[in-house]
Image (cartoon, grey):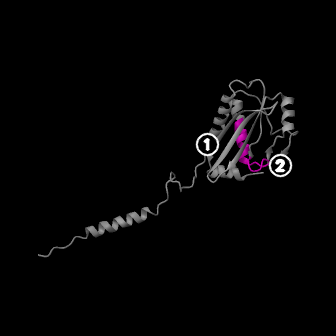
Amino acid sequence: MRHKSSPRPVFVIALLVLTLSVAGCTIAPRSSPWAKTSVDGDIIGASHAAVDSLYSQTSGLLSPNRPLIVATFVNIDDLEQTSSFGRIVAQQFGTRFTQLGFPLIEMLIRKDIYIKQKGGEFLLTREVQLLSEAHDAQAVIVGTYASGKDSVFVTSKLVRAKDNTVMASFDYRLPVGPDTHHLLQQGG
């Protein structure tokens, strides 16, 4: 009687080789260092958290009866340039300070400050002092941002208007997904 060899070991080895070669072609998971970030960070949540930090650092130094000025956040590589990102972050900072009970001087409707077309509000030191004196503003919120490969890095400061002293500051990083990338490209 002749014994037939089973094709099973050859089939199992072929299946194992095929499985491993297909697994090598799969897309890297998002947690992999080689995966490209495609999810945006929470821009609104990060802006509001930054304001909360600025506010907590002042420990009662801000008066709820005196207004604040919020300037457009600018590109750190060119302080006369901004983007839709810099403008919307400034607006979100203003929203959060308003929610905390502070009056704001709305810069979007002002015509007596230096505004670069499509650039937002760029406050010159002399103009800040004049505006703060005219409106009894106690502080100015300013900020910069820098685009990295997969993140945008933001620095925000609360500056006392009368002497340009930084009262509080906060840095944060946001992942750049499609919306944030688009906002950073919409410049001026």
Where does the image place residue 128, in percent across and percent down from the top left?
Answer: 83, 36
Which residue lies most toward the left here?
1
Where does the image place residue 130, in percent across and percent down from the top left?
Answer: 87, 33
Q: Amino acid at mark 1?
A: Asp
Q: Is residue 75 left or right of residue 22?
A: right
Q: Give the labeled residue for mark 1.
A: 42
Q: Nearer the viewer, residue 58 or 176?
A: 58
Q: Which residues are magenta?
A: 75-93
Q: Residues within 10 Å of mark 2 (few under 14, many from 20)?
A: few
Q: Amino acid at mark 2?
A: Gln
Q: Give the labeled residue for mark 2.
A: 117
Which residue lies most toward the bottom here?
2
The quadrant in which residue 124 appears is: top right
Identify which residue is drawn at 26% across, 67% down: 8
Q: Is residue 84 left or right of residue 124?
A: left
* Marks 1 & 2, CB-CB < 8 Å contact: no
On residue 19, the disc is: none
Where does the image place residue 3, in percent across and percent down from the top left?
Answer: 16, 73
- Residue 178 lies in magenta, yes or no? no
- Asked if 144 appears above or below 159 in the picture, the reply is below
How many numbered marks, from 0 up? 2
Identify which residue is drawn at 49% across, 59% down: 27
Where does the image place residue 112, in percent across and percent down from the top left?
Answer: 88, 39
Q: Nearer the viewer, residue 168 or 122?
A: 168
| Mark 2 element type | loop
Identify which residue is drawn at 67% across, 34% down: 51
| Mark 1 element type | loop
Q: Residues within 10 Å of mark 1 (few under 14, many from 20)?
A: few
Give how far apart the Cα atoms at labels 1 and 2 are: 28 Å
